[in-house]
Amino acid sequence: MIDHRNCADTRVFREVARLGERLETIAPKVIGTCSHPRITMVFDWENWWAVNDACAVDNRLDYRETFLDFFRPLWELGVDVDMVDMEGELDDYSVVIAPLNYMYKKGYAEKVRAFVKQGGCYVTTCWSGEVDDSDLTYTGAHPLEDVLGIRTEEIDVPAGYCDNSVRYQGADYRITGLCGLVHAKGAKVLAEYQNDFYKGYPALTKNGFGDGEAYYIASLNEPGFLRALYGEILKERGLGCGLQVRLTEGVTVNERSRTAEDGEQTGRIWFLQNFNRQPAVVELLAGYENVETGEKMTGKIELPSFACIVLSGNR
């Protein structure tokens, strides 16, 4: 990072040099490690194009923003998440989340069916499995009707503000987008619509299939709904943030580790990152070591704005 005057006495040079020093310090702990997410989300470019072209349903619908809405609660929980397209392999994951999976490419439904049958958890939403990879509508049953345990009837686009909600675990969550009308065909109904002609229709279902289960979210809802649902899924699956920490808004965690010959994960380290423009306080619920300084850390700690610290060990 030398400027045009070939001078090292600049702010940018000093910051890059400092970053190099930090990387050299943490290298022995970091080299050879990688992330091992147990959750993946399906993000597919061809599906994105197909959703954008299907403006007859709702030209306000944004696939990318909806995808981020489904990703954000996991990021806030400090849970590592991978991303695959519809041609990616699913075998290494415990949970697969596929929002607005409008297009099903050839072989995708069979791949999902095998994943769930072998013990995986599949989460999808309304307006999924509508067309094939030629953008031709499926006629008859939904391609994953047996896995999801539902029959889809129609998709509705509320005009403007939607004065409707879904009730899940005793709480009401406002609907913010598309609403699918479905019928349970073996699936357990976990949430229902509360108003209008939707009332009584399933808004969230769970179906056991083989050794796994599949969730169908019939409507797009406010963020609290996904936080509640993900909390249940993570609990059932024994997943979550590997760092024992109480996070605050704008702070997240990424875990890395080495894989031993027997497949066990060793040498775990955590990158604790503050994405806020102001300092943030988090609380470590166990003892850890700052990889850069060797300092033992526990309890409440303050992270400067845009700071990152690397922690190791569980002491």
Image (tube, rainbow, N blue to C red):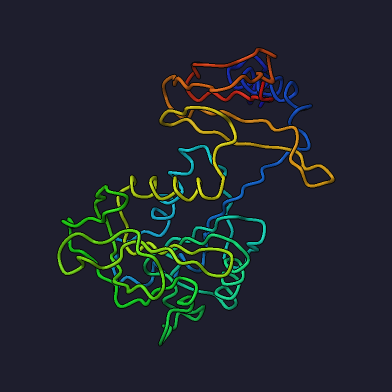
* Residue lying at the far right of the rendered structure: 261
257 lies left or right of 44: right
* Residue lying at the far bottom of the rendered structure: 140
Q: Residue shown at 65%/18% (left/top)?
A: 290
Judge by depth and name the residue closer to the eye, 311 or 24: 311
Q: Residue shown at 78%/37% (left/top)?
A: 32
Q: Residue shown at 41%/31% (left/top)?
A: 249
The image quadrant where one finds the N terminus is top right
The correct choice, above or below, for 1 with respect to 138 in the image is above
Q: Image quarter for residue 142? A: bottom left
Q: Position of residue 21 (x, y in %)?
A: 71, 19
Q: Position of residue 180 (x, y in %)?
A: 30, 69
Q: Where is residue 6 in the image (x, y as percent from the top left)?
A: 69, 21
Q: Where is residue 18 in the image (x, y as percent from the top left)?
A: 66, 18
Q: Please tell me how many numbered marks the rendered image carries.
A: 0
262 lies left or right of 288: right
The image quadrant where one finds the C terminus is top right
The correct choice, above or below, for 138 with respect to 186 in the image is below
The correct choice, above or below, for 110 with respect to 251 in the image is below
Q: Image quarter for residue 193? A: bottom left
Q: Image quarter for residue 151? A: bottom left
Q: Residue shown at 55%/33% (left/top)?
A: 253
The correct choice, above or below, for 13 with respect to 58 in the image is above
